[in-house]
Image (spheres, grey):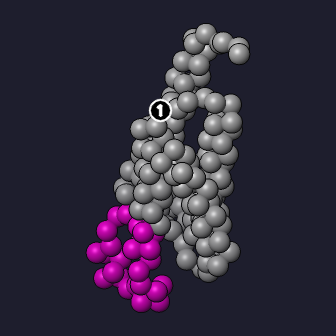
Amino acid sequence: MIRNKPYLLLIVGFALLTIFCFLANSEPTIVCNIYDSYYVLNVKYSMLFYAYLFGSASLLYLFLDSFKINLSRMVIWFHVLGTIIMMLFFFCIGYLSNELPAQEKGIDYLLDTPNYSIYYLIITLILICLQILFIINIFVSVIKKMKTPHTFK
């Protein structure tokens, strides 16, 4: 079943992220420093955002499947697995950047802290490229469907 419909993994991801979002503590944050700007993301709300992203992508896949628009299976697998793996990396890096409680982070820790912002940037760029690949796959499949002659039986 999953071999023919890999977007079901996105539905499972949607369900898991939604459940984890309601079980998560609202204190943990992900801090991203880009040049002189600091972005602080609440882990609970970022999980909810990605749950909605997974849910909307799976609904789009279901919509395309119901209209019999045949997407490239290899590109679908690449998109689904790439998105799930990048999300896991995103939250693992968020966990690593908050590995010590706030009161234990002294000046020595701040001086030796690795810059996780570049990792966030790379993951975000990969996710954007995967979404663009998904959109290209949709356009190519729709154009192929429009070029094929329709036979009515």
Q: Is residue 97 magenta?
A: yes
What amino acid is found at the position of numbered circle 1 in the picture?
Ser
Give coordinates of residue 43: x percent, y percent. Answer: 57, 69
Q: Is residue 137 magenta?
A: no
Q: Is residue 92 above or below residue 152?
A: below
Residue at image location 45% in from the left, 63% down from the top: 88
Range of magenta residues: 92-116
Question: In the image shown, does 122 or 23 lie closer to the viewer?
Answer: 23
Question: In the image shown, does 73 or 99 lie closer to the viewer?
Answer: 73
The answer to whether residue 107 of the structure is visible from this angle is: yes
Q: Quadrant of residue 19?
A: bottom right
Residue at image location 52% in from the left, 32% down from the top: 71
Instruction: Report the side of 111 relative to 88 (left or right).
Output: left
Instruction: Report the side of 139 relative to 107 (left or right).
Output: right
Question: In the image shown, does 54 or 122 lie closer to the viewer?
Answer: 54
Q: Is residue 57 above or below residue 12?
A: above
Instruction: Report the side of 7 relative to 77 (left or right).
Output: right
Give coordinates of residue 40: x percent, y percent. Answer: 55, 65
